[in-house]
Image (cartoon, rainbow, N blue to C red):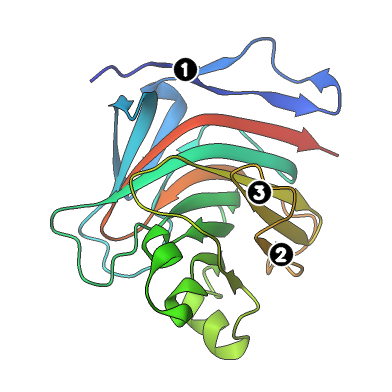
Amino acid sequence: MNPILPGLIISLLLGSTKLTAQAIRLTKDRLLPNQVSMSFGRIMGKEALRVVKDTTIQKVDEPTFVRLKGVDFTNGTIEVRVLSRLLKNAPETARGFIGIAFRIDEANSSYESIYIRPTNGRADDQVRRNHSIQYYSYPDYKFDRLRKEAPERYESYADMALNEWITLKIVVRGPEARLYLNNTKQPALLVKDLKHGAGKAGGIGLWVDVGTEGFFADLTVTKQP
């Protein structure tokens, strides 16, 4: 496995002003795994970062991600291609969970996240299909609380499947976030009230949950004032 991903870069932009002098090549020293393991390799025609949740973490919707060092994000766009598979020992409840954590505040152990459940996208059950996309806010607003207190508001449906590249684009502006899948013009999920407020700043993480072998490629971050 090669620890350097020449094809996986982060472009940081502020309007038309470039914030970085050059594209950043992701290497181990620029990534910080948090309750996950990471490695590098080629899958489905792409060089990718592989992420698997630590088996010692039993709870779901936890900070199980690879954080990007030196990235501080408030408003803008995060776009990445993801692919997930189920691990051989994945539990029956595994759904291929994979997504993005953003505005990560290490001091307060908090962040926002939007992720997908690829197995639900083509399930032969409409209720499961309705739970293909999920927003949650750590630590107080995990999926189960949001589903109970505000059913359907923070989840949505979109066509997707395991073992295929899916483009996730999250557009964040103040208290709102929108998720676009596979370059569609309309968002698949609208979140109007990010739980940590409008002006929160923090890091970005590439997130997975239980039972997932997750892959990430072609990451772009565009920052806006």
Q: Quadrant of the N terminus?
A: top left
| Disc 1/disc 2 C-alpha distance (Å) | 30 Å
Residue at the image point whose x is 78% and y is 62% from the top: 175
**x%, y% of residue 177?**
72, 57
100 left or right, relative to 223: left
Residue at the image point whose x is 81% and y is 56% from the top: 174
From the image, tell me which residue sits under label 2: 190
In the displayed orientation, state which residue is furthest to the top: 21
| Disc 3/disc 1 C-alpha distance (Å) | 21 Å
141 in relation to 196, above or below: below
Nearest the viewer among 180 and 40 is 180
38 left or right, relative to 203: left
186 in relation to 223, above or below: below
From the image, tell me which residue sits under label 3: 170
Residue at the image point whose x is 41% and y is 58% from the top: 118
**x%, y% of residue 61?**
43, 66
**x%, y% of residue 48?**
38, 28
Residue 69 visible in the snapshot: yes
Considering the numbered disc 3 on the image, is that residue within a helix, a strand or a loop? Answer: strand
Q: Quadrant of the C terminus?
A: top right
Labelled pair 3, 2 in contact (Cβ < 8 Å): no
From the image, tell me which residue sits under label 1: 7
Q: What count of labels does the image hold?
A: 3
Labelled pair 1, 2 in contact (Cβ < 8 Å): no
